[in-house]
Image (tube, rainbow, N blue to C red):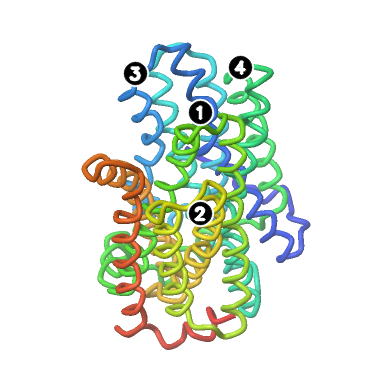
Amino acid sequence: MRMPQSDTLAPTAHPLQASFFLVLVGICAALHIWKLPPALPTLQAELGLDLVESGFLLSIVQLGGMTLGLVSGLFAERIGLRRCVLAGLLILALASATGALFHSKALILLFRGLEGCGFLMVAMPVPALIKRQVPPEYLSRLMGLWSCYMPIGTVLILLAGSWLLSITSWRVLWLGLGVLTLLVMLLTLRIIPPDPGAQAQVQDRPSPWSMIRITLASPNVWLIALVFGVYAAQWIAVIGFLPSIYVAAGISGSTAGLLTALVAGSNIVGNLSAGKLLHNGVSPPRLLATGFLTMIICAFAAFGAGLSTTSQFFAILVFSMVGGLIPATLFVLAIKYAPTPQTTSTTVGWMQQCSSLGQFSGPPVVAWVVHAAGGWEWTWLATGGYALAGILMALCIGALGHRPDQDASAAG
């Protein structure tokens, strides 16, 4: 897909304003990921989806991230980061709007898969774009803000989407998000500076296979990506199953949705705090270990300690809030430990690929443990296993050597 060269529309935003706008672009993309859960009961009734088909519809959006994260990072570097974001927004807009026009389960699955690819093309290049926009001293705090895009999008669509679905159909929501995303694409064309010219892009750039080899040869890149995967697996499992747990406890569906939105939104606090703490000199391994250790304690308190429903809610709230230290820290580390400046996007792409794998595999693993052990009170065993693995890998990050020129540029 060929995007406009876009030099005819001169950007007018200050670099910091452009970076803030990129966070809004990520939030817009996240709306598409989380628009399905509140609409799933209606889709099941209208299309006759069984449980397996419903589960596949929920997870297929991660297929692109699971399989194409690294390749998308390479693609973004070849065509230009801004053009990749524009292409992803266009895919999201068209897939969402077109998916609303069909009644076929197969076609809706297809367009849902395309949305996953579009989301990846939007979310993956943004950290490198922000790095291009801002001075190094702002980078860690802006990465903290950027890492909030998913929880903010989750809260917005769980609340606004649920309200909209109470007065109209899921097709209106799909069409509305398509129009919104198209408008965001046009604003991106106006606000974000064009990519460097073709000559500047190819200068001193390694071949595609060399970029992949360099990226995957770095132990730090693997550790950062796998840490993101084990974090995403437990967070998405707890948030995804939370409405079902509350309904099983006798809480109404609307109240369960509100409580889940509050838990997801609390993740924003941790993300923003991580950016500030990193800027103030707190070490990334300490932040990662703090996040994972808190998630272990809170998961046990929420599920294994036999607490009241109110106490369980606050434990899960802290689980999500302090766990938010982890993604913001990992985005900063991905930029810091990218093997070369040209492999920043492929590093973030590999991290996104492992995150998608965690999001895809986490819920079924937790469900299997719960089923085998005999109840939701054993949820903490599965999430705790992920968290322990995360702590061990986090302590190894940085001990294996890295580019010495990156400390100043990423410390922010």
Residue at x 61%, y 47% (from the top left corner):
262
Select label 3 or label 4 by which is in front: 3
Q: Is residue 73 visible?
A: no
Q: Where 217 sits versus 10, above or below?
A: below
Q: Residues within 10 Å of mark 1 (few under 14, many from 20)?
A: many
Q: Nearer the viewer, mark 3 or mark 1?
A: 3
| Quarter assignment of residue 224 | bottom left
Measured along the vertical axis of the image, is residue 117 above or below residue 314?
above
Q: Quadrant of residue 109?
A: top left
The label shown at residue 95 is 1
Of tags 3 and 2, the one toward the viewer is: 2
The numbered mark at residue 316 is 2
Residue 169 tag number: 4
- Mark 4 or mark 1: which comes first in sequence? 1
> Considering the image in quadrants, where does the C terminus appear?
bottom right
Cα separation between marks 3 and 1: 23 Å
Q: CA distance from mark 4 to mark 1?
A: 17 Å
Amino acid bearing label 1: Ala
Between marks 4 and 1 in the image, the one whose residue lies nearer the viewer:
4
Q: Earlier in the sequence, mark 3 or mark 4?
A: 3
Q: Measuring from the top left, give residue 113's x and y in whole percent.
A: 40, 32
